[in-house]
Amino acid sequence: MKTAKDKLLLLAGADTKTALTDALKGFFDLDILEADTEKKAFELIYTHFFILVLADETHPHTDMYKIGAMLMSHRQTYNTPLLILTDTGPKKQFLADFTPLKIDYMAKPLEGEFVRAKINIFYELFKQKKAVDQSLNELDKIYKKTASQYDLAVQEEFLKKELTGRSVTAANQLQQPLRLLQGSMSQLLQDKSAGPRVKSGLASIKTAVDRIALIAKKLSAPPVKSKHIPLPEGQAPQPAQGYQILYIEDSNEDFRIFSHFIRGVITCSVSQAKTLEKAMELISENRIDLIFINDILPDGNGFDLLLKLNQVRSKIPVIFTLEKHSLHKGPEAMAKGAFAYFAKEEISAEHIFSIIHGTLKKAGIAREAEDARNRIIIISRKDFLTKLYNRQCFEQELESEISTSKRYDTPLSVLLVDFDHFKAVNIAHGYDTGDAILTTSAVLMQSMVRNHDLVCRYGGEEFGLVLPNTALNGARMLAERIREKIAGFRFEAGTTELNLTVSIGIASYDHKPGTAVHDLTKNALQALALAMDQGGNKVRAFI
């Protein structure tokens, strides 16, 4: 099935259109839709979705104020970037008047390499935003599903309680007339004047009345407590040894009462901690599935524990136990991270059952939401094609490694790897072949580095490597290995085998005060440019 291509709108004259389409040919799998008048541009914008709008303000039929107003007035184009082609530079007044739009400028005459680099930035941002939007949709689906399940469970619980209440009421109402009927039947059976057939019929009626009385008695009795709590749908099975529960409570009597009730509804092991210090020790050394905590403790309170758990990013669900006169603290506890709260005076097996069930269900929803958020973060840091980390991640990690290198006085090196004459490959063999080469190269380089080294797609056909605790000589050895590996590899383009080479620039951190990410990257780019200027298939270091 052929997938639709992403679209780019070009509003310009014939000369500019030719220059741009030539510059982009073979580099981006995009549909370029053209307009030579504002009217045509309006028609296209209202019938298509564009990742970028390019408008040549030097074109005689282009009024940039009309273009800006059109983009702002249409919901679908409000966030579409606008790249203005100009020969006079940015217009401050236009930028001020259209602040909500994402606007950038590109000077004429147009240079192919610069055009491709600029378009590539917008295209990569669009693909990352698209991937994040997909994860947000996934998160929304998870939320709606879990919320629906939770609402259904609440409704079922409410109906069950309502039916139970009605049954108990009806059973209680039956008690008195049944007792009167049983008494009357006993008297009639003792009447000696009644014949055998009458007594036989009365005996059958008495048996039926006794059975009805027994049923009514069962309906009136408290419900039988379940010995095992049912897990929320989709959650992992209960551990064979049961849940590990920690109750932070300094009163031995309250702990015994709590243990008695909780063991009646769930298979578990219950531990006691009398202080916050002991609690944190147990939490750090053991697997804990659920925490109950008393509000007042010898060395602090329940809020102090919530703060400590948040600081260590604990995901263990916490339930507050409060004195009845302190129930007003419950909402505050939940606002600070507790999943539920209840009054000690109202403790019962049924109440414990309800609290634990609801907490485990909410904890499951929270874990699914956290997983979805983590997926969004991972997607936003990954390159769409090669699955390597992207340029943003490269710069963030490099900044972190520079700080570490400063602190511990350790070496740090950076490699920038770029294919020689890659444009010719795209033109001769197509965009898909170029993508396959980049993906294969990513796997090759990833297999040649250490676990703590970072390989990223820096942009286009460029790769960036961050090498912690690596001096210049070590970086040079790795660069030579990568160069030789690529030069000796046979890339496939249909039935044809391609021999490709790369140029590599190296920069090592010199521990000079004030050195930042852009300094080290700039040095590596200078070394890379030198390697390519000398014919390619070379490794050069910035000295």
Image: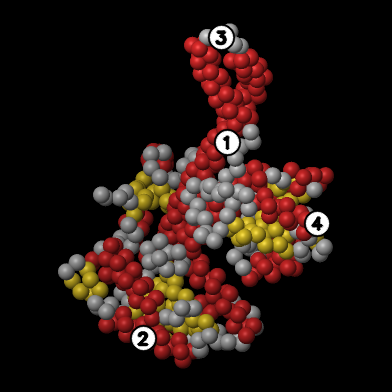
Mark 3 vs mark 1: give the one in front: 3
The amino acid pointed to by label 3 is: Ala
Q: Earlier in the sequence, mark 4 or mark 2?
A: 4
Q: Earlier in the sequence, mark 3 or mark 1?
A: 1
Q: Are marks 4 and 2 in contact (CB under 8 Å)?
A: no
Where residue 157 is drawn, which disc sits there?
1
Q: Position of residue 423 (x, y in %)?
A: 31, 69
Seen at 50% across and 15% down, the residue is: 200
The answer to whether one can see residue 207 in this image is yes
Where residue 194 is drawn, which disc sits there?
3
Mark 3 vs mark 2: give the one in front: 3
Rounded to the nearest angstrom, the CA distance separating label 4 from label 1 is: 33 Å
The amino acid pointed to by label 4 is: Ile
Where residue 481 is drawn, which disc sits there?
2
Q: Are marks 4 and 1 in contact (CB under 8 Å)?
A: no
The amino acid pointed to by label 2 is: Arg
Q: Earlier in the sequence, mark 4 or mark 3?
A: 3
Mark 4 vs mark 3: give the one in front: 3
Q: Are marks 4 and 3 in contact (CB under 8 Å)?
A: no
Q: Earlier in the sequence, mark 3 or mark 2?
A: 3
- In the image, is residue 263 above or below residue 175? below
Rounded to the nearest angstrom, the CA distance separating label 4 from label 3 is: 73 Å
Rounded to the nearest angstrom, the CA distance separating label 4 from label 2 is: 63 Å
Counting other residues with Cα less than 10 Å from the Cα at mark 4, is it few (<14), some (14-19), or many (20 or more)? some
